[in-house]
Image (spheres, rainbow, N blue to C red):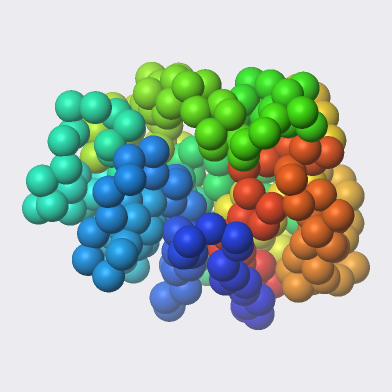
Amino acid sequence: MQIESLFEHGTGVLNEDYLLMEDNIFGVFDGATSLSPNTYEHGYTGGFLASNLAGEEFRKNGGSMQELAEKANLRIRKGMTERNVNMSNKKNLWSTCAAVVRIKGNQMEWAQIGDCRIICVYEDGNFEFLCNSPDHDKETLTMWKKVGPTAESSIGVALHDQISKVRCRMNLDYGVFNGEPEAINFLNTGTHDLTGVRNILLFTDGLLMPNENPCKERDYSEQVSLFRQSGLKGLRDQIRSIEATDVNCCTYPRFKTHDDIAAIAIAI
């Protein structure tokens, strides 16, 4: 196997993603920006702690993917308990999405929750997702497309109530690791034969091509084509250059000019 990776801080206060590469297990974790102003040791946010605690649990690589996921979710809950987080309000919960694969011979085990992606790219150029990722931000970004150009504040301020509403639907409408037992109901796991697979891509949404129409289903063909031509770094450069033309995040609706990136490309 040949491994290419990216781990880059976006325009937030700190990088809330986490990158896992340990022996035969690989993963990306995307901590959600906290709606609570609380920070913890070293100024860490809930999103940072969620992604790092979950990633560290998977790094131990003991047990099935289901078991690792359950341990990761419990570890987040324990972390919140230790820091006296009020867990009765969903807006206070630390949360992270995740995509993890473990390779054994010609087989791959995988686990996914939230909007981190796993793509298999085949030798003939075709590609497939191992599971569908929920687009729980579609409504919010569609609203921002309409009001953003005339808004006097950032999306986080202008659409605070909408963002809070979506966050409160965690593990009801969509899944994330956030310490709630219900998270495991939204966990996707499986195995995949690697015959004919050229690359396995795992990435957080900082590596998504900017999208002008959030209400339309995303087309990943350009993204995969750019990766095949230029690798992760070439894809990153194209994404960042487009985002730099739209610092107010209105033409291509999103939450930050540049989101954090955690990405891994495994060449079989």
Instruction: Report whether 79 appears left or right of 70.
Output: left
Q: Residue at x 16, y 36 (%)?
A: 86
Q: Residue at x 86, y 46 (%)?
A: 221
Displayed quadrant of residue 182: top left
Displayed quadrant of residue 260: bottom right
Instruction: Report whether 18 appears left or right of 253.
Output: left
Q: Residue at x 62, y 36 (%)?
A: 153
Q: Nearer the viewer, residue 187 or 85?
A: 85
Q: Nearer the viewer, residue 183 or 104?
A: 183
Q: Is residue 131 visible in the rendered structure shown here?
A: no
Residue sitting at the far front: 152
Q: Nearer the viewer, residue 214 or 217?
A: 214
Q: Is residue 246 visible in the rendered structure shown here?
A: yes
Instruction: Say if 108 sits above or below 167 in the image.
Output: below
Q: Residue at x 73, y 37 (%)?
A: 253
Image coordinates of residue 49 in percent, x first then y, are 31, 58
Q: Nearer the viewer, residue 195 or 19?
A: 19
Displayed quadrant of residue 179: top left
Instruction: Report whether 40 appears left or right of 172.
Output: left
Instruction: Report whether 68 appears left or right of 158.
Output: left
Number of callouts = 0
Instruction: Say if 2 sits above or below 122 in the image.
Output: below
Image coordinates of residue 175 in percent, x first then y, are 42, 32
Image coordinates of residue 22 in percent, x first then y, are 42, 75
Image coordinates of residue 41 in percent, x first then y, are 22, 66
**Image quadrant containing the C terminus:** bottom right
